[in-house]
Image (tube, rainbow, N blue to C red):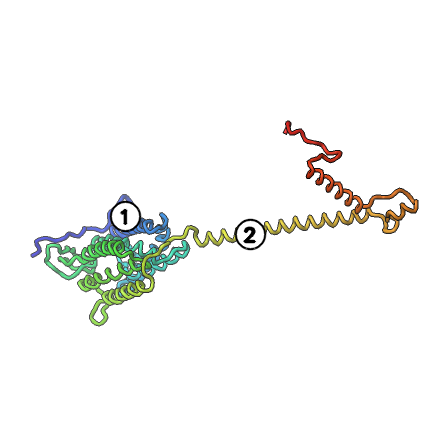
């Protein structure tokens, strides 16, 4: 006889007028918001910019939902493609059925795309988001409570979960495995936050700790479940998945700590790679434009110089007819002409006289003395 139990909701849908609000979908959405909120706080604390986590989540969340659904449909294909089943139900994600393994795997692909576009390292972003993901799972598991699914073996414990009669289920009280996993995920989130502060985890090790700790709990919780599942060597498929993935996470944690100790000093560059490339291209184009304008100015000056030389050549008389020299004047042919050389020599002599006079403190003839009073 069961003295106490956890009741299940009579329905998983609440209608707000014509709009149905499904408990399972509400839990998933709420979990995503909590993960992004906590991840954003941790990202800023690591030196990142506000909003970066949300921008990358725009890529990660849709990929994660598709991956989670694909994993569930592939591993439980008989529910949708078996005899008498309707394959269209595979698209009814609101009725439940998301595999965390597929969600994390394909969600990581979406996150990688988003990180690459922002020019930030994926491991650093994953470390910031790790405890938030665990809390999102803790909240999302309550969606199974709304749908009365994924419970454990029958029990009469005070915290047993009451299940009503329905499709593919028998009325009774069972282990609330959804609650066990929800509480375990809260513990995982707290563990990652503590370890990250205590040991300054970086380069993906906080995320690896989350994966390893989650797998440790998922293994024994999965073993308690009684819903239909494929078995390999006497164990449920998800138990084997938890073992393999958990071991891989431990190996990554150990190897990463040896190869890349410490934490990233810079998690987000000041200028995104795409913008940096555009700025460099614009700067290069500006330099080319300045060079072209300088070349055009130089060509113009050369052309002007050439034109001046041509004009001088046209103005000068023919060689012998225009040749004036002191010898011609001495013969009495006419007054002596001053050549450019004579003028330059005279100017030089005048400059020398002025310099000598200045050195002697005298004013040369014809020079004007400035009025120092006016200055």
Secondary structure beneath label 2 = helix
Q: Is residue 337 left or right of residue 168?
A: right
Q: Residue at x 13, y 60 (%)?
A: 154
Mark 1 or mark 2: whose residue is earlier in sequence: 1
| Outermost residue, top side | 373
In the current view of this chain or complex, which residue is farthest to the right?
332
Residue 349 or 10: which is nearer the viewer?
349
Compared across the picture, whether 170 is left or right of 66 comes to: left
Residue at x-position 65% and y-position 50%: 296
Residue 43 appears at what percent x and percent y? 33, 51
Q: Nearer the viewer, residue 123 or 87?
A: 123
Numbered disc 1: secondary structure:
strand
Which mark is on residue 285? 2
Compared across the picture, whether 254 is left or right of 119 comes to left
Residue marked by disc 1? 20
Dots 1, 2 in contact, CB < 8 A: no
Mark 1 to mark 2 CA distance (whole Å)? 56 Å
Above or below — where is 223 with respect to 143? Answer: below
Q: Position of residue 363 (x, y in %)?
A: 71, 34
Q: Nearest the camera: 151 or 277?
A: 277
Quarter of the C terminus within the rendering? top right
Residue 104 in which image quadrant: bottom left
Residue 183 % position (x, y): 19, 55
Visible residue check, residue 73: no
Asked whether residue 191 is in view, the answer is: yes
Kindly give the residue lying farthest to the front in the view shown: 360
**Quadrant including the N terminus:** bottom left
Q: Nearer the viewer, mark 1 or mark 2?
A: 2
Q: Residues within 10 Å of mark 2 (few under 14, many from 20)?
A: few
């Amino acid at each position: 006889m069961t003295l106490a139990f956890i009741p299940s909701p009579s329905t998983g849908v609440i209608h707000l007028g014509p709009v149905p609000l499904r408990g399972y979908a509400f839990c998933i959405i709420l979990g995503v918001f909590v993960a992004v909120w906590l991840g954003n706080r941790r990202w800023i604390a690591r030196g990142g910019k506000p909003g970066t986590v949300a921008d990358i989540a725009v890529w990660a969340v849709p990929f994660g939902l598709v991956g989670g659904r694909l994993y569930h449909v592939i591993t439980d294909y008989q529910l949708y493609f078996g005899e008498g089943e309707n394959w269209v139900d595979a698209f009814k994600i609101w009725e439940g059925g998301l595999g965390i393994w597929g969600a994390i795997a394909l969600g990581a692909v979406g996150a990688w795309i988003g990180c690459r576009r922002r020019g930030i390292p994926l491991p650093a972003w994953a470390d910031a988001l790790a405890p938030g993901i665990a809390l999102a799972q803790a909240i999302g598991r309550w969606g199974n409570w709304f749908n009365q699914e994924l419970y454990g073996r029958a029990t009469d414990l005070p915290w047993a979960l009451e299940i009503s009669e329905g499709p593919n289920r028998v009325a009774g009280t069972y282990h609330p495995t959804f609650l066990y996993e929800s509480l375990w995920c809260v513990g995982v989130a707290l563990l990652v936050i503590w370890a990250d502060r205590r040991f300054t985890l970086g380069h993906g090790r906080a995320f690896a700790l989350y994966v390893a700790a989650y797998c440790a709990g998922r293994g024994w919780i999965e073993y308690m479940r009684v819903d239909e599942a494929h078995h390999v060597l006497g164990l449920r498929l998800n138990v084997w998945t938890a073992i393999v993935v958990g071991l891989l996470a431990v190996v990554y944690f150990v190897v990463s700590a040896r190869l890349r100790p410490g934490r990233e000093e810079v998690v987000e560059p000041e200028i995104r790679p795409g913008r940096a490339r555009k700025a460099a291209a614009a700067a290069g184009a500006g330099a080319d434009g300045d060079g072209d304008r300088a070349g055009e100015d130089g060509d113009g000056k050369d052309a002007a110089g050439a034109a001046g030389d041509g004009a001088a050549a046209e103005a000068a008389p023919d060689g012998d007819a225009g040749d004036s020299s002191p010898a011609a004047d001495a013969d009495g042919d006419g007054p002596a002409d001053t050549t450019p050389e004579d003028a330059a020599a005279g100017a030089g002599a005048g400059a020398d006289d002025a310099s000598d006079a200045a050195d002697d403190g005298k004013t040369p003839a014809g020079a004007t003395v400035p009025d120092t009073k006016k200055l």
